[in-house]
Image (cartoon, helix red, strand yellow):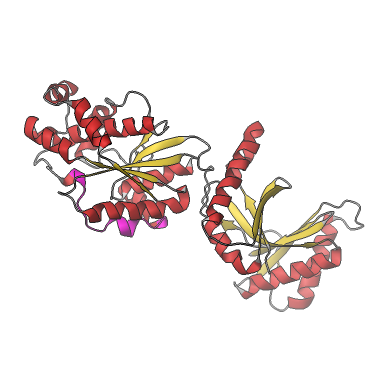
Amino acid sequence: MFNTIIIRNGEVAIKGENRPVFEKKLMTNIKKALYGMQIQGYKVYKGEGRIYIDADPEIMDQVIEKVRNVFGVVTLSPAIKAEKGYEKLKEMCLEVFEDAIANGEYKTFKMDVKRQNKSFHMTSPEMTKDIAGYILSKHGDKIGVDVFKPELTVYAEFRDNLNIVYARKIDGAGGMPVGINGKVATLLSGGIDSPVATYLASKRGLEIEAVHFHSFPFTSEKSMQKVEQLAKIVSLYTGSIKIHMVNLLPVQKEIAEKCPEELMTILSRRFMMRIAERIANQTGCGALVTGESIGQVASQTIEGLTATNDVVRTMPVIRPLISFDKEDIIKIARNIETFETSIIPEEDCCTVFLPKRPATKLKLEKIYKAEEALDIEKLVSEAIENSTVVDV
């Protein structure tokens, strides 16, 4: 029945002179999402100030499920596109109306007709009344008209060369097209927070390169597999992700041997940021992204964040969750379906050598003094040299 999809791109539409660049990127990302389905019978194109996807009716549901997860798509509507002609338009409106009432319960409806062909002898309001009357003549015993707050609206576009009719408006992922605002390196753990932070960063048009820290063999291979699974789920929104798997264990052993125990967590975090920044520079990223939220753990106090920011010299650190409550984060994690994977019990590198009483009121002078016992450059370089890359 439905043979085209209307894409509405919200924020992209207000970008003025830059709008074509945003639309081109969105179309590219839609094509990538559909290419991953390994299906045939669709066409993505721009027309009448919108983006359209023509698709065979039998694959329409598959296309919708893929496209609704593409950042930049605010809403989409499955529609019927057919040859021009007013009588044909009336039949199309009836068909869309009957499909809607067969799949939902509605007590009221209205027609919304836009007439592009100004030479036609009826005005848009006249067409609206005529088509609504035609539908009521078939189904008046089942539904009434409410022009102010209808439960169902059937939209019809009467154009010079064709007709388009639709009723449903399906919510998309919103945001901006991935890649339009550059690329970032996200510190991706197996917890709840960092996959959500990665998702939110990508929603603002940022391409993702991920860095994961593990402590194999003190942590198991299952913990790395868990992160790959989380990245796979998030990639439904972000597109493909490269994960740089970095073994932090040699660094942690050095810290445990040569530095005060209460500084173990913050010193480890500082090394993570140094390593992630180095990888970010090597892979063309312009910022780091973390899943930190104020006050959640000892290293996420103001002093802790100051101490980790202190080692990042060449780029900003973006923290999408900085003011989020844990319940807010969990709600998003459930919506994007990472939550159930995140709560699978697996140790991560932060639980290795965990101090009994981690320092919270951190002084940079004390941290600098502790780090004098470490060969920072050697530890960072070796960690990167021994890292592996997984494509998800």
Would residue 144 appear left or right of 231 to someone viewing this image?
Answer: right
Residue farthest front in this picture: 385
Residue 123, given in percent of the width and then of the height, sits at 86, 55
Residue farthest bottom in this picture: 141
Residue drawn 39% across and 58% down?
337
Would residue 278 appear left or right of 104 to someone viewing this image?
Answer: left
Given residues 92 and 389, the one toward you in this image is 389
The image shows residue 276, relative to residue 352, as above or below, that is above
Would residue 110 appear left or right of 193 to someone viewing this image?
Answer: right
Residue numbers of the magenta segment: 335-350
Residue 229, given in percent of the width and then of the height, sits at 34, 55
Quarter of the rendering containing residue 137: bottom right
Give the quadrant of the N terminus.
bottom right
Residue 144 visible in the displayed image = no
Quarter of the rendering containing residue 34: bottom right
The image shows residue 125, relative to residue 206, as above or below, that is below
Residue 365, given in percent of the width and then of the height, sits at 16, 20
Residue drawn 80% across and 67% down?
90
Residue drawn 53% across and 53% down?
33
